[in-house]
Amino acid sequence: MLVVKGLIKRFGGFTAVNDVSFKVDKGEILGLIGPNGSGKSTIFNMLSGTFRPSAGSIVFEGSEIAGLAPHKIINRGIGRTFQIPRPFRRLSIFENVALAGYFGQGGHSRAKADSSAERALAAVGLPTDRRARVDGLGAAALKKLELAKALATEPTLLLADESLGGLDEHEMDQAADMLRRIRDELGITIIWVEHIMGVLMRVVDRVIVLDHGEKIAEGLPAAVVNDPKVIEVYLGTDAHATRAVAAAAAR
């Protein structure tokens, strides 16, 4: 579904992503992990059109999309969530999701956007009542709203950016299960960036590890956590996270 080759992003003299290549097969959940500053968000920004790559190729479903504007990429079927939900507070929950659907589908039909919003809200467990307000939604519900907005664009590939941030342990498990259901029931392929690796490792099919903008490991979760380079990176930055990953992979 997605083939990335030799992806590079420079900001002046700083190279944030250096010659990263990978592929994503239809129907899988790919985990993208690494310490802060490893290049995860920069890759997401290039995949979604926010950043133009300095070099490299991004081929989605057979077509080159590197450098396309965000609205053209989302219209082709790549949806994205963001780490920090920023809903339109003056709009209802339904209107927030319908607006995302209208934009993401190219603005051709308000009725289609409304229908997509109803399906997306039902999929994440938020009310479809068109009068329900955003005010008062807690952290978990705001994450669901962010996910519903992405689903309303009717993506075939979802870029899930830190869907567990700010959630308690129970809410994390629910959010992870929801991503798995989205793949299994809706047939949406997922790339998931996450810092809470103990949960991520229970859900993903494969993992890519980044460090200082370069890919240092790729493979099945159980194999990746035993890679000496990965152990070195996480023992040097977050030993607790490393132990959590190893425990999750063991299960």
Image (tube, rainbow, N blue to C red):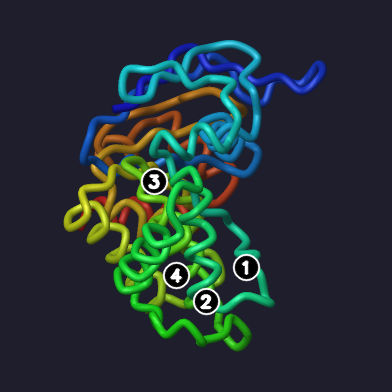
**Location of mark 1 (residue):** 87
Depth check, mark 3 against mark 1: the one in front is 1
Earlier sequence position, callout 3 versus callout 1:
1
Which residue is rendered at x = 76% and y = 21% of the image?
14
Image position, residue 71 (x, y; %): 56, 38
**Location of mark 2 (residue):** 93
**Kind of residue indicated by mark 3:** Leu
In the shown orientation, is residue 188 left or right of residue 229? left
**Kind of residue indicated by mark 4:** Lys
**Kind of residue indicated by mark 1:** Pro
Residue 38 visible in the displayed image: no
Whether tag 2 and tag 1 are in contact, CB under 8 A, the answer is yes
Whether tag 4 and tag 3 are in contact, CB under 8 A, the answer is no
Q: CA distance from mark 4 to mark 2?
A: 11 Å
Residue 13 vertical placement versus 103 (above, below):
above
Q: Which label is found at residue 158?
A: 3
Residue 166 vertical placement versus 103 (above, below):
below
Total labels drawn: 4
Q: Secondary structure at mark 1?
A: loop
Quadrant for residue 174, please give it: bottom left
Depth check, mark 2 against mark 3: the one in front is 2
Which residue is rendered at x = 41% and y = 47% of the image?
192
**Kind of residue indicated by mark 2:** Ile
> Foreground: 49 or 44?
49
Earlier sequence position, callout 2 versus callout 3:
2
Q: Residues within 10 Å of mark 2 (few under 14, many from 20)?
A: many
Depth check, mark 1 against mark 4: the one in front is 1
**Location of mark 4 (residue):** 144
Earlier sequence position, callout 4 versus callout 3:
4
